[in-house]
Image (cartoon, helix red, strand yellow):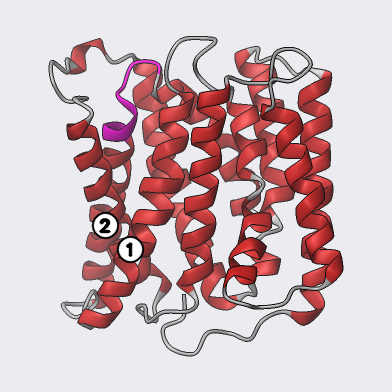
Amino acid sequence: MIVYVVWGSTYLAIRVVVETMPPMAAAGARFGLAALLLAAILRVSRGRGALRVTARQLAGAAPVGVLLLTGGNGLVMLAESGPPGVAVPSGVAALLIATVPLLVVVYRLAVRDRPRPTTVAGVLVGLGGLVVLIAPTGGAAAAPLTGSLVVVAAATAWSAGSFIAGRISMPTDAFVTTVYQMAAGAAALVAFGVLRGELRGVDLTQVSARSWWALTYLLVAGSLIAFTAYVWLLQHAPISLVATYAYVNPVVAVALGALLAAEPVTPRILLGGLVIVVGVALVVTTERPRASPRPRTRRR
């Protein structure tokens, strides 16, 4: 339930953060601070060896963290930044990210895993919904094309991280895994922010109070609570079951965007979103009976 509802609300919080904060640097601060806080909690509650991992486990957690947080979250923040007409609405961003379970199936095909025909049909249906949302044919698209493609890239990175997490060596404890994933993701986010010139001339006095509150919400609810819950689920549940959050997140995000930020909810957005959710539902309900075995080594 935490992943279902809290993550749906983070899309609007991201929009508020990037109103007055540089996107990649803000995301780096969010995950960097969350990693430090969680590490401190584990150190105090469990003792000196709480964060001890092998080099192999660290080498597994770090790239997954970069894919999930730098690629997945950072690119969403980048896509939602900018003036109206350039930035992707938070609700549309959530709908595009809902394609993650579909993209996981594509990765399975790439490694010669053979999904059921119904699963492949679900992927095709869901990707059709994506086209409805971003294709400019027949009038204006539901969101700026460039920004929408950035969100699709974010979904691709997130699905890649989720896919490989259970297939490589990682820390066995979900909280420890979260610390190292967030630390790696934060470092990469800050590096990208520096390369984009986001830190030049930054004046923190110009950051609005609502952006600070939104960043705090993302840090506590989105990172410490929801992301840790997601990592735990990846370690203890089949990915097809974990992916069901994609049903609820878009509904929460679109509703909050419309109610609190006056984001338009057009027939095209509703149609594209519905088609995506139907495709995801087809994939998840088909795959659940043959849930994959739990990962052996680290687990994700």
200 left or right of 262 in image? left
Number of marks drawn: 2
Number of the front mark, 2 or 1 = 1
Amino acid of disc 1? Pro
Question: Are the residues flagged by discs 2 and 1 in contact, CB closer than 8 Å?
Answer: yes
**Residue toward you, 178 or 290:** 290
Residue 128, image x and y in percent? 78, 41
Residue 69, image x and y in percent? 39, 50
The 10 Å Cα crowd at callout 1, few under 14, some 14 to 19, many 20 or more, is: some
- Res 10 visible: no
Cα–Cα gap, marks 2 and 1: 7 Å
282 left or right of 216 in image? right
Residue 190, image x and y in percent? 22, 40
Q: Give the vertical position of 170 relative to 13 (above or below).
A: below
Q: Which residue is mark 2?
A: 184
Q: Give the vertical position of 124 relative to 64 (above or below).
A: above
Q: Is residue 21 in the magenta section? A: yes
Q: Which quadrant of the figure contains the N terminus?
A: bottom right
Residue at 58 percent across and 85 percent down: it is 294
Q: Is residue 81 in the magenta section? A: no
Q: Which residue is mark 1?
A: 63
User: Magenta segment, which residues?
Assistant: 19-26
